[in-house]
Structure formats: C-alpha cells, structure tokens
Amino acid sequence: MAMVTADASAAADAATKQPEADKDYSSYNGASTAGVGGGARRGGGGVVESVVARWKREDMLDKCPLALHAAAAAFAFVALVLVASNQHGDWMQFDRYQEYIYLLAIAALAFAYSLAQALRHAHRMRSGADPISAPSARLFDFIADQVVAYLLMSALSAAIPITNRMRTAVINNFTDATAAAISMAFLAFVALALSATVSGYKLSRQMYM
C-alpha cells in the first residue's frame, strides 16, 4: 500500500510540473520567434535602403556626363568668343600670336566636341537609345574626354606665359580679355577632366561585371 501511495504521489507531482514546463518553453519560444521576425524585418529594411541608395548613385552618374559636357561647352564657347573678338589694333591683335591662335583652335574643338557629347547624352536620356553601341560608348567617352582635356591643357600652357609677360608690362582690354579666355578654357578643362573620371569609373565597373 505504501508503494502504491508513493507512486500516486509522484505521478501527481509530474502532472503538476508538466504544464509549468510547457508554459515556460512556449513563452521562451514565442520570444525567440518575435526576435527573429524583428531581425528579419530590420534586415529587409537595410536591403531596401541599400538598393535605393544604389539607384540614386547610378542615376547621378548617368546624369553627370550631360551636365559636365554642357558646362564644358559653355566655358569653351566663352573662351572662343573672347579670343576671337580680342582685336584692338597694332600689337593688340590675337592673330599676331601663335599661342592665341592655338588657344582659339583648341577652344573651338572643345566647344564642338562637348556640345556634340551633351546632345548625344540628352538624346540617350530622353529616348533610351545611345547612338554609340553600349560596349564601346564608355571607352569612347573615357578616351575622347582625356584627349580634349589634354589639348586644352597644352593650349593653356602655351598661352599663360606670354599673357603673364604682357601683364607685367601693361594691363588693358587686350590682356584682360586673354586672361579671361584662359580662365574659361581652364574651367572647360576641369569639366572634361571630371567627365573623364566618371567615364573611367563606369568603364572599370563594366570590365569587372
């Protein structure tokens, strides 16, 4: 009888503890599930933010060539006009100096190239079709921007020394106009150099994709 009573008491104790154990484990599992769900939601939000940031960056890089080439065309055009109209008689004629003739020619080239590129990128962004095939378009942009930027720098290197010598002797409308033309040509160089940098970045991504 004593053994039967002891077994009955043990069974009753086990039945009493079992719901408590289930209750503890169920609450623990619920907390874990909630934590995992919250982490998943936070992780999903991070992925969405990363994708949106990437789209914004790519959109900015896609618009940069148009803006930079338009700026380069504007600066080169101003430099072109300043040099071509710099004729004040006697020694104050731009065509009496090879350096200024070279600057005029390169400014005209930079204006024509930058304007053509700006129109091309505007057409591409509006219609979605690039006149140059996609695989070679970025390579063309990278090389052409560098070539024209180098030519602008060589023209500046030729025009700056003679202008400095003139301005040490006299400062007048002629020397002021040439100094302004050199400044505009330099800004065109900066715009094309930045465009070449963007084109190089796009080209490197294309090669490693």
Image: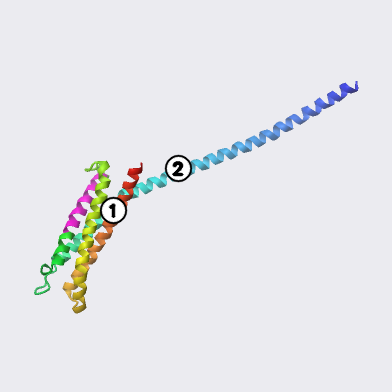
Whole-Å distance between the Cαs marked 1 and 2? 31 Å
The answer to if 116 sits in the magenta stretch is yes
Is 94 on the left or on the right of 128, as rendered? left
Q: Give the secondary structure at mark 1.
A: helix
Say if 105 sits above or below 40 in the image: below
Q: Residues within 10 Å of mark 2 (few under 14, many from 20)?
A: few
| Tag of residue 48 | 2
Q: Is residue 121 visible?
A: no
Q: Is residue 28 visible?
A: yes
Q: Amino acid at mark 2?
A: Val
Q: Which residue does the image show at 87% across and 23% down from the upper left?
A: 5
Residue 192 appears at what percent x and percent y? 26, 56
Q: Nearer the viewer, residue 189 or 114?
A: 189
Q: Amino acid at mark 1?
A: Ala
Residue 143 appears at what percent x and percent y? 25, 51
- Residue at the disc numbered 1: 196
Is 26 on the left or on the right of 77, as rendered? right
Q: Nearer the viewer, residue 66 or 186?
A: 186
Give the mark nearer the N terminus: 1 vs 2. 2
Q: Which residues are magenta?
A: 108-124
Residue 171 appears at what percent x and percent y? 19, 77
| Tag of residue 55 | none
Q: Give the secondary structure at mark 2.
A: helix
